[in-house]
Image: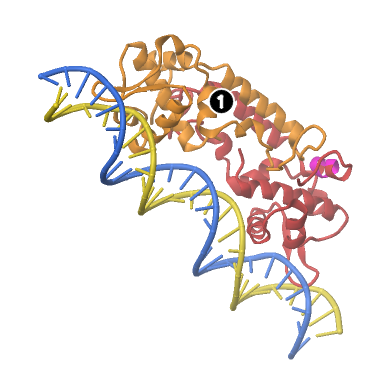
Chain colours: A red, B orange, C blue, D yellow
Amino acid sequence: MFSKACEYGIKASIFIAINSAEGKRVSPKAIAKEIASPEAFTAKILQALVKNGVINSVKGAHGGFEINKNEIATVKLSQIVNAIDGDKIYSNCGLGLHTCDEIHPCPVHHKFKIVKDELRDMLENTTLEELAQNIKSGASFLKM
Amino acid sequence: MFSKACEYGIKASIFIAINSAEGKRVSPKAIAKEIASPEAFTAKILQALVKNGVINSVKGAHGGFEINKNEIATVKLSQIVNAIDGDKIYSNCGLGLHTCDEIHPCPVHHKFKIVKDELRDMLENTTLEELAQNIKSGASFLKM
DNA sequence: TTTATTTCGGATAAATTTATCCTATATATA
DNA sequence: TATATATAGGATAAATTTATCCGAAATAAA
């Protein structure tokens, strides 16, 4: 469904949100350990998230990655996915046609639309705050 | 969402269904032309579909690929997807956790379940006959 | 200002997916 | 049986994704 990069990006963002809520910055090393991902690759993904304004980075001693406390509730899953995989997951044709719309639909266009809309809604209505809260409460997990 | 191989496999199956309904077998060459796919790669995918019993192949002169007329209505999209991509699209964790279920859910487990169930339902309730019919009537298209 | 720390970013490598090519194998028909 | 026709399948290559490495640039603190 999502690329590995995107999976890591989502999990990393949640971990950063949890720490930022406590005023703590985190390193790629700490993130990779927490979400069980390759460190250098994770660092690249963090760069992409910074470029897209999803998270902030602070260089130098006592630096690290963070998210503004008051933005944690506003960051949507869709922003993270878009920053890494783009919007192809819901904008591209399910069967790879270059032109696929209401007047020139692929064989599964209408049926796929329902699934893609459901996915888009889900990504646009899920915030980092909500996901971070469930990790904190032990209702969900970032690894294993 | 699906791999290229799976996209080609679905489109190829539809084209084979259309021709089989008229008692005609088709070659990888004809299929590739009709669905705008690389011929040799498409041939490989057809082999996988044959191995999984989704379509039949007949070697030698006047041979080609076909689907038993009376099976066209029973072949579901899920069978094609399973034959090529496996069931990972709805069985794997959306965030790549090895263990992700009700008692050890990833952060998006419950939200993803709705989307994955919707997708599974769609794939299990769509038959080749239905898709072939829409191509025949001009309601949908296999390429462009 | 020097040093330790930490992200940035380019180069490269490994793994997977996508794609191509060529020969073997099977089959209908002359 | 010989020949033409088709799929099967192995080997290989190209492209993309995933992953690693290392020096450059920035920053805090001594």
Q: Nearer the viewer, residue C28 or D13?
A: C28
Q: Mark 1: which amino acid?
A: Phe
Which residue lies at the image location 58% right of the left edge and 34% below the top edge? A90
Q: Taking A41 as reference, is B41 left or right?
A: left
Is residue B46 covered in magenta?
A: no
Q: Would you place residue A23 above or below residue B14 in this image?
A: below
Find residue B136 and report its horizontal and vertical position in percent.
Answer: 38, 14
Q: Main secondary structure of the magenta part?
A: helix
Quadrant (top left/top right/bottom left/bottom right) for the C terminus of chain A: top right
Q: Which contiguous range is marked in magenta?
A: A130-134
Q: Taking A96 as reference, is A22 left or right?
A: right
Which residue lies at the image location 47% right of the left edge and 22% below the top edge? B53
Give residue D4's quadrant in the image.
Answer: top left
Find residue D27 and report its horizontal and vertical position in percent.
Answer: 75, 73
The image shows a total of numbered marks equal to 1
Residue behind mark 1: A112
- Determine if residue B60 is in view: yes
Find residue B12 and report its horizontal and vertical position in percent.
Answer: 40, 26
Q: Would you place residue B54 above or below residue A88 in this image?
A: above
Q: Nearer the viewer, residue B108 or B90?
A: B90
